Amino acid sequence: MDTSARGISAREIGRRIGASAMEVNQLLLSQEFLRGEPGAYGLTSKGEQFGSEREHWNGYGGIARRSFETTHYDPAIVEALDLAPENLAKVRETITMRKQAQSAASQLARAEAEKTFKQLMASKEAVAPDKGIDPVKVLMVVAGVVVVVGVSYGIYRGVARIKRVKAERASE
């Protein structure tokens, strides 16, 4: 990657300081270089001194979001950051707590959806008639099949007899 033309990304900063891109973004957020939340960061006036945002568009229109933004920083931002171990530890703790909160919210939403689904299914089962096998219907189907087979066999035998009788009359 040519970093001279557009600067370095959060991933590259993280590689240089021994942190992940997520940790770097959280560090930039805590030191007011960024604003927003994960996935929707923007540069503050302090951050604009060291970085720039570039929008990429893939050429397609339509309803879906067809573009995305990348943020690149001047390599001097590494010196401007407060990289004290306690700051990195605080950032990692913040990320861990956010992930745990997201996981708990997701599990709660999943449990609520499951509960609602089970209630809906229980109400549908209470309204729906019993779908057991009715022996009378089974007997009627079997009797119908026997009648169809019997009639078919009778027609087969009758046609064979008619052909035989015609053949005997023709030979007389």
Image (cartoon, helix red, strand yellow):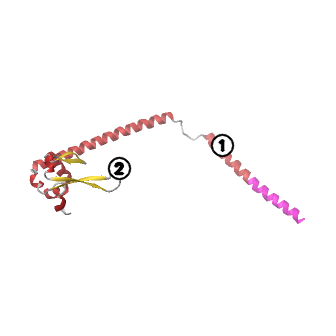
User: What is the residue that sits farthest to the bottom in this orientation?
Assistant: 171
Q: Which residue is mark 1?
A: 140
SS for dot 2: loop
Q: Amino acid at mark 2?
A: Ala
Left or right, 123 with respect to 33, comes to: right
Left or right, 127 with respect to 20, comes to: right
The picture places residue 157, in percent across and down from the top left corner, at: 77, 56
Whether 104 is among the magenta residues is: no
SS for dot 1: helix
Q: Amino acid at mark 1?
A: Met
Residue beneath the point at 63% across and 40% down: 136
Query: Which of the pair 13/104 is nearer the observer?
Result: 13
The picture places residue 99, in percent across and down from the top left corner, at: 24, 45
| The C terminus: image quadrant | bottom right
Dot label at residue 64:
2
How many other residues sit within 10 Å of disc 2, few (<14), some (14-19) or many (≥20)? few
Up the image or down, 171 lies above or below 117; here it is below
Q: Is residue 90 visible?
A: no
Dot label at residue 122:
none
Whether 171 is among the magenta residues is: yes
Up the image or down, 110 lies above or below 156; here it is above
| The N terminus: image quadrant | bottom left
The picture places residue 144, in percent across and down from the top left corner, at: 68, 46
**Label 2 or label 1, whichever comes before in sequence order:** 2
Badge nearest the viewer, 2 or 1: 2
Residue beneath the point at 45% across and 36% down: 122
Query: Which of the pair 62/134 is nearer the observer?
Result: 62
Residue beneath the point at 11% across and 48% down: 87
Q: Is residue 105 visible?
A: yes
Residue range in magenta is 153-172
